[in-house]
């Protein structure tokens, strides 16, 4: 099997703790050949965790122009995505870039335009689109195991303490991306919700800031209308800790998702199914490989889909700011 020569740009938490473990499992398909980061020291530390040890470059431009790699993994602050995606595509490199696609919809549209003009792959790394339990739930809903979906509820909280390694990153303390953690992490949940139930037509929302040190609103409640007619409520907080719950209620039964388990209750029966327990990063890079090397259609890393995820969040923020219902599609016009 021909290996994909991959360079990692941005050698911080995401590259070290999320991407590298998955890439090590894919060493038969993907070889990490080069690294570059804001500081050479950070790239050098990451290189020492990789066998064979990749070459460390002093600058991103030097790496991209070297010809050493055929693809780059951009694990950067969101605000840098458009600039570095454009640089990589102009250097004829395939790109996998961490979500969100951009800091807001306006910038996301520019990234989408870059992708459309290039003959290289631009893959937005949204690991929740690859998590097996959401893909399994999607199939079960599509096969009408709970009838027609009527109501969706997702409550997700993860208190980001002041000394949390993610909360301490400078670009999250003073976020340029819309609504801070609500977009940074919230696009995960929107991606999963859309995987299971399809596109979201309209939203209304309230946002609140609970922890001053998080730099932006950290708590949201959003009402959603899906294009399939289902209605729902999404609650998320990065300033509070009270658990995670997902429920989908249909005309013929109810579905509850807990970790990698799906519980289905219908008239007179109940069953529990288990999906493979995965955070989706292995599947994400495996899919990226197939898209680049075999020409597989880029469905799960589609920039257009990533932009839709972000647009739902921006629509919620707009709803809160302007106190009105917001049609998601209008922001994409």
Image: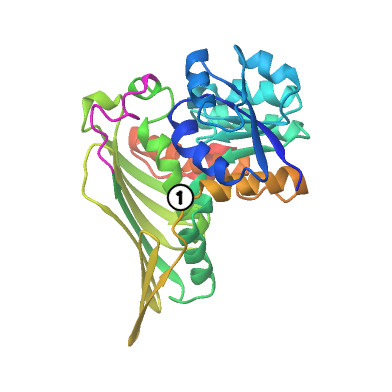
Where residue 185 sits in the image (x, y, percent)? 40, 39
Q: Indicate whether 117 appears above or below 87.
A: below
With 166 as the anchor, is 50 left or right in this view? right
**Residue 39 seen in the current view:** no
Tell me what residue is drawn at x 73 percent, y 18 percent: 66
Q: Indicate whether 267 appears above or below 154.
A: below
Where residue 269 sits in the image (x, y, percent)? 34, 85
Residue labelled with disc 1? 279
**Along the line of sight, the residue nearer the viewer: 207 or 167:** 167
1 in magenta: no
Tell me what residue is drawn at x 73 percent, y 24 percent: 68
Dominant secondary-structure state across the stretch colored magenta = loop
Q: Quadrant of the C terminus?
A: top right
**Along the line of sight, the residue nearer the viewer: 22 or 255:** 22
Tell me the crowding category of disc 1: few under 14, some 14 to 19, or many 20 or more residues within 10 angstroms, Cα based.
some
The magenta segment is: 158-170
Tell me what residue is drawn at x 25 percent, y 52 percent: 243
With 24 as the anchor, is 133 left or right in this view? left
């Amino acid at each position: 099997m021909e290996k994909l020569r991959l360079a990692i740009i941005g050698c911080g938490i995401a590259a070290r703790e999320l991407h590298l473990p998955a890439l090590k499992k894919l060493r038969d398909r993907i070889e990490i050949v080069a690294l570059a980061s804001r500081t050479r020291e950070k790239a050098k530390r990451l290189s020492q965790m990789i066998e064979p040890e990749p070459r460390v470059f002093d600058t991103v431009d030097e790496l991209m122009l070297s010809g050493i790699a055929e693809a780059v993994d951009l694990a950067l602050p969101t605000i840098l995505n458009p600039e570095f995606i454009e640089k990589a595509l102009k250097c004829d490199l395939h790109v996998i870039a961490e979500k969100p696609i951009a800091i807001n919809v306006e910038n996301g549209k520019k990234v989408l335009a870059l992708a459309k003009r290039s003959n290289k792959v631009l893959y937005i790394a949204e690991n929740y689109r690859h998590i097996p339990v959401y893909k399994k739930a999607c199939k079960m809903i599509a096969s009408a195991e709970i009838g027609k979906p009527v109501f969706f509820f997702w409550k997700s909280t993860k208190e980001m303490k002041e000394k949390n390694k993610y909360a301490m990153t400078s670009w999250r303390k003073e976020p340029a991306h819309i609504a801070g953690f609500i977009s940074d992490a919230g696009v995960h949940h929107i991606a999963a919700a859309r995987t299971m139930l399809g596109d979201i037509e309209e939203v209304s929302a309230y946002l609140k800031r609970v922890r001053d040190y998080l730099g932006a609103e950290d708590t949201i409640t959003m009402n959603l209308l899906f294009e399939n007619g289902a209605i729902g409520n999404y609650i998320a907080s990065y300033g509070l800790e009270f658990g995670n719950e997902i429920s989908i209620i249909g005309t013929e039964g109810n579905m509850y998702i807990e970790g990698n388990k799906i519980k289905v209750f219908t008239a007179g029966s109940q069953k529990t199914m288990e999906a493979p327990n995965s955070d989706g990063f292995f599947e994400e890079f495996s899919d990226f490989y197939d898209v680049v090397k075999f020409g597989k259609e880029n469905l799960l890393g589609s920039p257009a889909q990533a932009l839709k995820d972000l647009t739902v969040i921006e629509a919620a923020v707009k709803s809160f700011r302007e106190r009105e219902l917001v049609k998601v599609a209008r922001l994409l016009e």
